[in-house]
Image: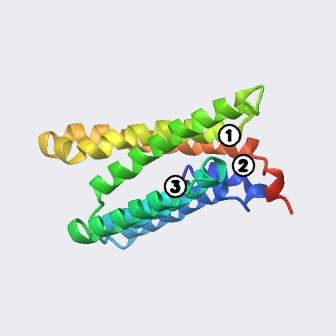
Amino acid sequence: MSPIIPLTVGINKNSNLLWWYPLVSLIFEIVVFVSKRILHVSHGWIGNFYLLAELIIVSLIYRSAVFKHSKVFLPIVFFLAFFLIVYTVVFSPMSFNLMAASVAHFFYIILCITGFYSLLQKQEFVYLEKSWFFWLNTALTIYASGNFLLFLFMDYLNTLDRPLFLKIWNIFFLLNITKNLLIAVALYHYKPAPRESH
């Protein structure tokens, strides 16, 4: 339920995609909880829809902040989304697609590196901690780096030592909570660009 924190902090900034990111996360968390704890039905496939939704939202945020004039960014995102859909349908329609998740999180790492570089290039802030984009990059760097490795080796760890895997899986929850707390800080500092104001 950690997405409630950034949603509360940014309640007056709900017209931007940064606020919608934790909202979508919260909706999917509730759907997974209901499926798993109340309906007792398979819920792994729900994560595939979240993976696609997250890819689209994160990509749109970065397109607006960094890649506005890039002609190759949207085709890359469309290709990745197409890959996620096709790979999931072919190989894991009813379970969480670990390979697609690893690819998506690796893409987020690349976005974060580019985002940090753009902050250094533009130098719009004397105090970097006042930049919402700095906090978003920090949140996604921590979240994506940990999840990339976790998803990449999940099957191997689960087969090798399931009790150890279940302990390591707690890292995912910690990464998710950390991401949401840092997005709350990003929303606190968020100010729309002048062209976004009407």
Seen as rendered, the residue at the extreme front is: 71
> SS of the residue at dot 1?
helix
According to the picture, the residue beneath numbered tag 2 turns out to be: 9
Mark 2 or mark 1, which is nearer the start of the sequence?
2
- Return the x and y of residue 107 as percentages of the image width and height: 43, 47
What's the amino acid at mark 3? Phe
Instruction: Compute the Cα span from label 3 to label 2.
Output: 30 Å
Give x and y (percent) for residue 62. 59, 50
Figure quadrant of residue 24 = bottom right
Residue projecting furthest to the left: 160
Residue under circle 1?
A: 185
- Residue 111 in view of the camera: yes
Q: Label 3, on which residue?
A: 73
Foreground mark, 1 or 2?
1
Dot 3 or dot 1, earlier in sequence: 3
At horizontal 26% and vertical 70% (from top left) the residue drawn is: 94
Q: Is residue 135 left or right of residue 90?
A: right
* Residue at 44% in and 42% down: 144
Residue 72 horizontal/vertical position (percent): 50, 56
**Badge 2 density bin: few <14, some 14–19, many ≥20, Cα 10 Å:** some
Q: Secondary structure at mark 3?
A: helix
Q: Quadrant of residue 127?
A: top right
**C-alpha distance separating marks 3 and 1:** 27 Å
Asked whether the beta carbons under mark 1 and mark 2 sit within 8 Å of each other, the answer is: yes
Alpha carbons under labels 1 and 2: distance apart = 8 Å
Q: Earlier in the sequence, mark 3 or mark 2?
A: 2
Residue 21, placed above or below residue 187: below
Which kind of residue does numbered mark 1 sit on? Val
Q: Position of residue 34 (x, y in %)?
A: 43, 68
